[in-house]
């Protein structure tokens, strides 16, 4: 609780109180870096939640819909029997299983069919039968995402039967794994936003600090670079707050370099105030 109170105090004064920057001249850079970590971690968490809250239900809906449609397209009476590396089905060949409707993208050319069972099928049938997969007497033939044909031998297939019951059991298992989707989305979202706010912004501050150092030298202030880096770091609180508000509201800033400009402009105001109050050594 004490840590949060300290963070809120430093945040509030960094964003609105230029007089507070006189106190920052006396603290070590480690204090400012700890503040920066908490500031960017908070921004990353809020940004992740902003996108995860509306996204997770949609992704879960799509996953459940895809699984339901895969279950629906598999015929109730289709039985695939495998023995000694060979397969048979209880249907007349070629037997076609269509692509689920949810995978039929309107803006992409997608095959109309998912699988075609045909002991005499060839590579050419991928196009002729408009399908993702051809299963012939010896191989499973498909096209990968790079539009290259891939062939997988079937001689290692285990002996047994595959029916609608097996499909439903598999889908039930996949539904169980689907409960981890929210955690996965939040985890990778948090990793990405943490990199952006923490790592990228930490390096970006080098440029902001150099610009403030140049301004300080123009005013006759000969402080160390670490001092200007510390000032730039706390001055970043204002543009970071604005950026976070824009993200939450779903508004895109159209002005180029506004973040750097706001950061440096506020830093210049701070330096001007510190010079006027003779706060520098």
Image (cartoon, rainbow, N blue to C red):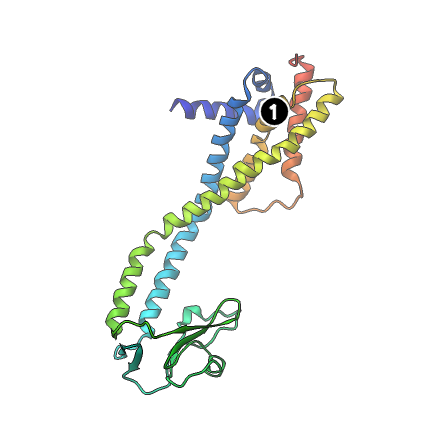
Which residue occupies the foreground of this view, 29 or 254? 29
Q: How many numbered discs?
A: 1
Which residue occupies the foreground of this view, 46 or 78? 78
Vertically, is 194 above or below 135? Answer: above
Which residue occupies the foreground of this view, 51 or 248? 51
User: On the rendered image, what quadrant is the C terminus found in?
Assistant: top right
Instruction: Report whether 261 appears left or right of 236.
Output: right
Q: Is residue 187 in sight in this rendering?
A: yes
Spot occupied by residue 13 in the image (x, y as percentages of width and height): 54, 23
The residue that appears at 59% across and 47% down in the rendered structure is: 252
Check disc 1: other Cα within 10 Å, few if <14, some if 14-19, many if 20+.
Answer: many
Instruction: Report whether 32 appears left or right of 59.
Output: right
Vertically, is 168 above or below 85? Answer: above
Q: Quarter of the image holding residue 200? A: top right
View extreme (bottom): residue: 92
Q: Is residue 245 in sight in this rendering?
A: no
The residue that appears at 31% across and 70% down in the rendered structure is: 71
User: On the rendered image, what quadrant is the N terminus found in?
Assistant: top left
The residue that appears at 28% across and 69% down in the rendered structure is: 167
What residue is disc 1 on? 231
Spot occupied by residue 43 in the image (x, y as percentages of width and height): 49, 37
Spot occupied by residue 17 in the image (x, y as percentages of width and height): 57, 22
Spot occupied by residue 37 in the image (x, y as percentages of width and height): 49, 31
Q: Quarter of the image holding residue 68? A: bottom left
Vertically, is 1 above or below 50? Answer: above
Vertically, is 272 above or below 64? Answer: above
Instruction: Report whether 175 appears left or right of 128.
Output: left
Secondary structure of residue under mark 1: helix
The residue that appears at 46% across and 43% down in the rendered structure is: 191
């Amino acid at each position: 609780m004490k840590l949060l109170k300290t963070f809120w105090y430093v945040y509030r004064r960094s964003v609105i109180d230029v007089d507070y920057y006189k106190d920052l001249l006396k603290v070590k850079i480690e204090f400012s870096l700890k503040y920066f970590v908490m500031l960017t971690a908070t921004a990353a968490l809020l940004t992740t939640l902003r996108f995860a809250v509306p996204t997770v239900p949609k992704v879960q809906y799509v996953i459940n819909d895809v699984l339901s449609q895969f279950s629906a397209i598999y015929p109730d009476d289709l039985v695939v029997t495998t023995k000694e590396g060979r397969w048979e089905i209880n249907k007349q060949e070629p037997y076609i299983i269509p692509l689920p409707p949810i995978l039929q993208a309107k803006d992409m050319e997608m095959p109309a069919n998912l699988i075609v069972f045909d002991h005499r099928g060839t590579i050419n049938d991928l196009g002729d039968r408009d399908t993702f997969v051809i299963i012939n007497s010896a191989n499973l033939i498909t096209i990968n995402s790079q539009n290259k044909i891939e062939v997988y031998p079937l001689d290692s297939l285990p002996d047994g039967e595959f029916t609608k019951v097996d499909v439903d059991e598999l889908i039930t298992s996949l539904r169980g794994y689907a409960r981890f989707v929210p955690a996965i989305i939040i985890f990778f979202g948090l990793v990405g936003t943490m990199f952006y706010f923490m790592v990228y912004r930490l390096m970006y501050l080098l440029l902001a600090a150099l610009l403030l150092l140049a301004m300080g030298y123009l005013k006759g202030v000969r402080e160390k670079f670490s001092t200007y880096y510390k000032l730039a770091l706390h001055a970043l609180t204002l543009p970071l707050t604005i950026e976070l508000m824009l993200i939450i509201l779903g508004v895109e800033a159209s002005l180029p370099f506004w973040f750097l400009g706001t950061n440096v402009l506020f830093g210049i105001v701070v330096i001007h105030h510190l010079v006027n109050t003779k706060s520098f050594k």
